[in-house]
Image (cartoon, grey):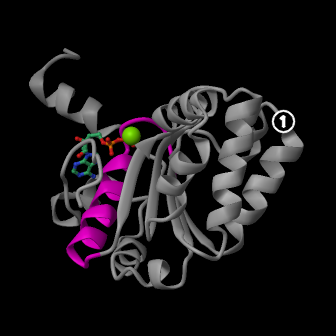
Amino acid sequence: RLAKLPYHKTLDQFDFEFQPSIDERRIRDLATLRFVEHRENVILLGPPGVGKTHLAVALAMEAISRRKTVYFTSAHDLVQTLQDAHRSGSIQQKMRAYTKPDMLLIDEIGYRKMDETAAHFFFQIVSERYEKGSIVLTSNKSFGMWGDIFGDTVLATAILDRLLHHSSTINIKGESYRVKEKKKAGFFR
Ligand code: ADP
Ligand code: MG
């Protein structure tokens, strides 16, 4: 049931005081998982280290504790897996892993650009889940830059159109928690 989470962290381990751009009430509201019942999406945007993956993982753990089916993948692994499956003729079977769960988490969209095949499958996943199952997505790139990620502005617009129709976007602005920990340990003296 714990679907490939990169680490296990809960909302209670999140220091909201450190990241004042995050409205704690909105996050607590997401943790009720009403958005999953309503098949809505959550998009966490912001620079590295501000807590995007932590919050995504916390929502995943909440969902798992409520017996929801959850699948967590990095965008990079997703693309790699789909390209391999495409080559070996098992793409339909693999697509089901991404379209079936109650909650699909896609971490770190935007660190790498997608080629045409990958962008096409990504669009297919978003289309098939549209109004059927929630996607929780993290990205370091604002929506205006998604044309670059998918190498195609028309396709990026079609993806965003479906993704954002029923969704909440959490825009995180602030310092990296990793840097804060390093500062505390004296790395930056
Ligand atoms: P990113 O935004 O790059 O996905 P992460 O969510 O992985 O960053 O956060 C980096 C590390 O810092 C993780 O270990 C995470 O648990 C921790 N972290 C980030 N923000 C907070 C916070 N506000 N309170 C507690 N831990 C945090
Ligand atoms: Mg991350």
Taking the magenta stretch, the answer to whether it contains residue 60 is yes
Asked if residue 13 shows in the view, the reply is yes
Taking the magenta stretch, the answer to whether it contains residue 18 is no
Callout 1 crowding tier (Cα within 10 Å): few <14, some 14–19, many ≥20: some
Residue 47: percent from the left, percent from the top?
48, 38
Asked if residue 149 shows in the view, the reply is no
Magenta stretch, residue numbers: 45-67
Residue at position x 20%, y 61% in the image = 10
Name the one closer to the observer, 122 or 59: 122
Residue reaching furthest right?
A: 154
Residue 20: percent from the left, percent from the top?
37, 59
Label 1: which secondary element = loop
Q: Which image quadrant: the N terminus?
A: bottom left
Q: Which image quadrant: the C terminus?
A: top left
Residue at position x 19%, y 54% in the image = 9
Residue at position x 53%, y 84% in the image = 38
Amino acid type assigned to the residue bearing label 1 in the image: Asp
Residue 114: percent from the left, percent from the top?
67, 29
Image height of 35 relative to 157, above or below: below
Name the chief secondary structure element in magenta: helix
Q: Quadrant of residue 63?
A: bottom left
Q: Is residue 7 left or right of residue 166?
A: left
Residue at position x 63%, y 54% in the image = 125
Residue placed under numbered mark 1 in the picture? 152
Q: Is residue 71 left or right of residue 151?
A: left
Name the one closer to the observer, 65 or 128: 128
Residue reaching furthest front?
A: 89
Name the one closer to the observer, 39 or 86: 86
Q: Is residue 173 left or right of residue 61?
A: right
Image height of 5 relative to 10, above or below: above
